[in-house]
Amino acid sequence: MLFCSGWNFVCPFCMNSSLIPLKSGVEIDSSLRKSRIMENIGFLDVIGATGGEPGLQPKSIVQLYTWAKFIKTFINTNRSHPDFLEKLLSKRLIDHIAMVIKSFLIPQKYRNVIGVKKDITQIISNIWKTLELVRTTKVSLELRTSVVSNLIDAAESIRSIARLAKKSGIYILRQFFPLNVLNDDLRHIKSTDRATLVWLAKVSLQEGVQKVYARTRENGLEGIELA
């Protein structure tokens, strides 16, 4: 897994907040990345890029994945860089895309959730463009939402997201942990309990999502059914 520094959102509940500044990491030469991969190739099934947002370092990721055609690759993205994903897809450099979706795509609501004060019309437009782009490919896709008490835990929000996810195939509801988050108020709330995740997963299934999972520390990744 390659953790990229730099994140163009400022989500108050971000659990990788130390990676938000673009200069928070250390520059790694491409030859070192390649040698690390080859040294461990017998143990690897896939190479992934997350962060941070890999779309902020597109040249580096495209270069690495062009070299790594002998192994499967995936990307974890906030969907705000469609041109980056389009390049990976057009060159057939990606096998799986995991996309984070924070809330339903209403500008005021999404702005609060991602912590961006400026106008986010272009961000919302890019997110829609990314969704339409990946739906026209055969690359496997999953959407993920972190469920945060008093912020992203309402059935209304999850139903709206599920309507987007039902064409994607897989939707994962993740347990929130108040670790290293930016908002001090969120440091003191409890982790999302499994019962809430299961309930919201069933709400998603009611909206027509084919495969819904709950991810917790206690049980790992669980497939959820309506019955």
Image: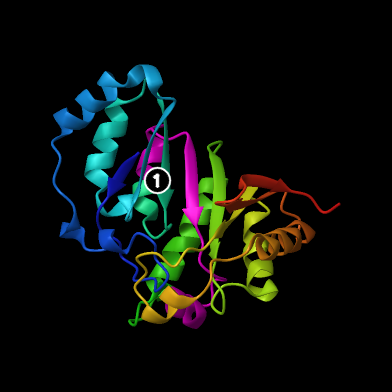
Residue 208 visible, this orientation: yes
Counting from the top left corner in percent of width and height, residue 202 is at 76, 59
Taking 43 as reference, is 154 above or below it? below
Which residue lies at the image location 15% right of the left edge and 40% below the top edge? 28
Counting from the top left corner in percent of width and height, residue 226 is at 82, 54
- As drawn, the residue found furthest toward the right would be 227
Taking 12 as reference, is 87 above or below it? above
**In this rendering, would 220 be left or right of 209?**
left
- The foreground one among 2 and 135 is 2
Q: Is residue 60 magenta?
A: no
Counting from the top left corner in percent of width and height, residue 71 is at 40, 23
Which residue lies at the image location 45% right of the left edge and 69% below the top edge? 124
Which amino acid type is shown beneath numbered disc 1?
Answer: Glu
Q: Residue 92, located in which quarter of the rendered image?
A: top left
The magenta region covers: 86-113
- The foreground one among 201 and 61 is 201
Residue 168 visible, this orientation: no
Q: Residue 160, located in which quarter of the rendered image?
A: bottom right
Taking 211 as reference, is 175 above or below it? below
Residue beneath disc 1:
86
Which residue lies at the image location 42% right of the left edge and 62% below the top edge? 126
How many dots with numbers?
A: 1
Which residue lies at the image location 34% right of the left edge and 71% below the top edge? 10
**In this rendering, would 78 be left or right of 206?**
left
Taking 19 as reference, is 153 above or below it? below
